[in-house]
Image: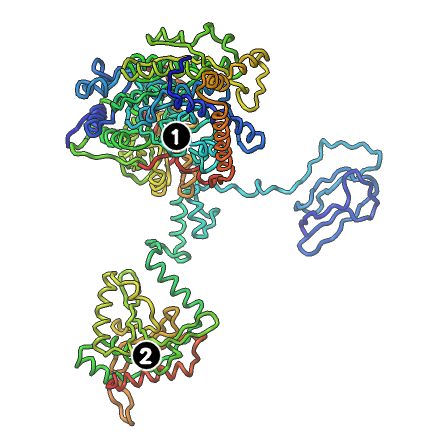
Amino acid sequence: MRKITYRDALREALREEMLRDSSVFLLGEDIGRYWGGAFKVTDGLAQEFGDERVRDTPISESAIIGTAVGAAITGMRPVAEIMFGDLTALAMDQIANQAAKIRYMFGGQTKCPLVIRTPFGAGVNIASHHSQSLEAWFMHVPGLYVAVPSTPYDAKGLLKTAIRGSNPVFFCEHKLLYPIEGEVPEEEYTIPFGKAEVKREGADVTVVATMYMVHKALSAAKQLEKEGLSVEIVDPRTLTPLDRRAIVASVRKTGRIVVVSEDCKTAGVSAEIAAVVAEEALDYLDAPVKRVAEPDTPIPFSPPLEQHVIPDEKAIIKAIKEVV
Amino acid sequence: MKEGTVGKWYKKEGEAVEKGEPLVEVISEKATYDVEAPSSGVLRKILVREGVDVPVNKVLAIITGPDEAFTEAEVRVETPETAAETEERIVASPAAKRLAREHDVDLSLVKGTGPEGRIVEDDVRKFIDDASGAIPKVKETILLSGFRKVSAERVAASFRTAPHSTIAMEVNASKTAELHQSTQVSYSAILVKAVAEALTEHPRINSTLDGDRIKLFEDVNVGVAVATENGLVVPVIRNADKKPLEEIDSAIRELTEKARQEKLAKEEVSGGTFTVTNLGMHEVDFFTPIINPPEAGILGVGRIVEKPVAVEGKIEIVPMMMLTLSYDHRVVDGAPAADFLRRVKEIVEKASEI
Amino acid sequence: MTLDLPKESLVKMYRKMLEIRFFEEKVFGLYGQNLVPGTIHLYAGEEAVAVGVCSALSKDDYITSTHRGHGHCIAKGADLKRTMAEILGKKTGYCKGKGGSMHIADFSIGMLGATAVVGAGLPIAVGAGLSARLRKTGQVVACFFGEGASNQGTFHESINMASAWKLPVIFVCENNLYAMGTRQSRIMNIENIADRAVSYGIPGVSVDGNDVLAVYEAACVAVERARRVEGPTLIECKTYRQKGHSRVDPAKYRPREEVEGWLQRDPIKRLRHKLIQTVISTEAELQEIEKEVSSEIEDAVKFAVESTFPAPEEALEDVYAQI
């Protein structure tokens, strides 16, 4: 099968959906013909679809999302890009209070088919305002779906599902994933929300990981294989809805779980997954749930500082060894 | 007596005591008795609390004169050991606890090999395996579901609610065997026909108990038990008493085939009034079938086997077959049940009536 | 005041304003009887703004509304019964009891809903305008908000964006002088919110918000401009809420003379006076209308009061749309 990058996979999804449905349009800062998006995801799309459908906006995050909400409830399918995930804080009212609640508050009168794409993640030395992983904020808002693709295949399939759906989707990308290559078929496909994928089968311990951490967990698993440990890696792919069943099934099999997530540990993604296991799989646990996550600090700038706070293979291996 | 257990103290610290009055209860292996105050004064300090075992000659309390100086510094009070001190906490994983619960395993007997000596699921499993004999080893667990579950519930309900009684008769099957040979009609069909005939004459067996009344059926619908991969099904031959043998035979063949393909319609497995179950082909001589509820009886058919039989004073080799009738004793008593079975026997032995 | 409108239109405006006034008085009364859960923000006194603007719109044009939104709903043509039922938290309400007084919407008449976060409706209105542009429908959007909201970042972001893209949005600022209890002069160094339009390169007009015809005229100009794809307009309507901020607010921070002055300029009284003076309507005609509206409101109350509450478990519905 052909291999393409995560970035190209996202662009393919956008392009295919724009060709398929004229109500799909893109808006965001510098996503148009002159820049193609800060991470080049929308590169070339303005040339193909015109400036009206690939719309450069002022630096107004709140208005970007609010405009997308207004368009979504009046028949369009906007895909808004927020240049960095950290900047969603500027648009939080529109995301959490408007997009997420507009259907509910009005008793189901309307739908809000809106996709908000944004990159999260540390590792490129751009410090506290451009490096966070804030997925958990959005898991805490009923009415939103939260997608967290880790591979080019998942990125394309999930983005297409997001665009075609009838609900607001917070679509998390990861800066370090954009150049990663992976198999993506030429043929049309979509990936349903709420369906985890076992990225690697194993018998001794379950590792639930998301986004870039899936790759670190895979590399840790490879190293541990040499020591005779068989690690199963479950990638939820969407955090809302969360495939609780897949996580519980894996824990029932292995009896041990390590949750790896790049966001801060307290009240984070890993906390929710750990709680699911405690509620639904306690009787199958042979060891305490372990979490590998960022310590509760902002992301620092200097490379040694930054590397210190990002979960790495070593931390994952250590946690696994503590539970087996 | 080498040691005793301190029981109830009759006096509190600070209370005045008279020489000779009961001060404390002591329980030994053989008896419970009171220790009297050895002198008068004030009970200053109880040194051994209730529930503590002490050797003979141990000082239990200090009594002083009313104004005598007393310092507590040097005295050590014996108190009963708490549960926490005596019992070591068993550290076991939730999974290990679950397995132990499921198999009645005492976790204090299991050695932990997990992190920090925790007992993990595998430890319990090994313990169970080692205790071979005591607990059978489970190879595979099959979830009771769908058809199997329904069938299990029905059988259990039948056995629980209908008091079963079973009677048996051995029959001469030579005519039946001849009929089978000459027409290729199955034994089951012959038995169904025989049973149907007999039921028309013994309606009490062709009935059901519904609350506080017995309903006698006019229709004679005979079910035939068929074993399939998923379990037992009982397709029904309706009005078997009015159908010729050939028709019954082809109906049984058709329904059996449908049963094996799981294609039986609901009406083809309902409405039975009596059941025939044949284990002859499995080389069973006789067995006690369980009534197919809500029917009142079931006929079990054993294999035909040649036996030496005394016929008019001579030993002859005759093909014989055992028929067993299980019936709901709430509905039918032994004698009428026997009459019915004897009638079935007659028909089978003549075969020509069929 | 230009009265070259057909009598029918003028009387319709009068009737709409009355509907809002009587409706709000009823809500006020029902609140006192403990029939309205939560709180209420009444529109009484500001009727000319909603009615003036909505009279300039077609049925398929959009509006966005605020926490003080009953008037916007009614002016856009919402059903009085379902509006009242929603305020009472009933299943027959517009939002099946999930929204309440601060969140009423009727998408079938282009009423895109009331948001209770001050200033949050502006970007949504811009989005509806963008949508109309992309779908080439010629629809326009009227966005209601107060002078308090003009201090939110979304005011700036939204008007700038709509202006840059020449979107068909009319920003209608209902300047009732008080952001909750804070008088405009204490928190803003300008008197006219309309002045802010300059910085976005769009027209900004201040009108007497208690004169329905003045509002209507300004709105018509803005609507035409929007339909000609020339971009948005900021209309500031100077008006006054006759009640406190919310039901619990006696509004003691407002000088008595100020309140009385504004009551003199009551928008409904003024239109009524005009209609009589110019011999457009007779006293009897207007009394007949007043009677009719009054009975309509009674019907709405009866409907709302007699409606059932939603089943508790309906709280779990409508969070997500089925894909």
Identified at 84% across, 45% down, the residue is B18
Q: Nearer the viewer, mark 1 or mark 2?
A: 1
- Find residue C106 and name its label: 1
Which secondary structure, mark 2?
strand
Q: Is A213 situated above or below C318?
A: above
Residue A211 x/y as whole percent? 30, 28
Applied colour scheme:
rainbow
* Residue that mark 2 sits on: B323
Q: Is residue B184 left or right of residue A121?
A: left
Amino acid carrying label 1: it is Asp
Residue A158 placement, left or right of C146: left
Residue B2: give x, y in percent of width and height: 67, 50
Looking at the rendered structure, whether the residues under marks 1 and 2 are on a common chain is answered as no
Instruction: Report whether A41 appears left or right of C294.
Output: left
Q: Which residue is at 19% across, 21% downward?
A: A49
- Asked if disc 1 and disc 2 are in contact, CB closer than 8 Å, the reply is no
Other residues around mark 2 within 10 Å, as few (<14) / some (14–19) / many (≥20): many
- For the residues labelled 1 and 2, the Cα–Cα distance comes to 79 Å
Q: Position of residue C38 (x, y in %)?
A: 53, 29
Q: Position of residue A267 (x, y in %)?
A: 43, 28
Determine whether C15 is above or below B234 in the image: above
Q: Nearer the viewer, residue A306 or A90?
A: A90
Relative to A105, say whether B182 is above or below. below
Chain where mark 2 sits: B
Picture quadrant where residue A224 is located: top left
Name the residue located 57 percent from the left edge and 21 percent from the top edge: C249
* Disc 1 element: loop
* Classed neighbour count for the residue bearing mark 1: other residues with Cα under 10 Å, few (<14), some (14–19), many (≥20): many
- Picture quarter with the C terminus of chain B: bottom left
Q: Amino acid at mark 2?
A: Leu
The reply to whether residue C197 is in sight is yes
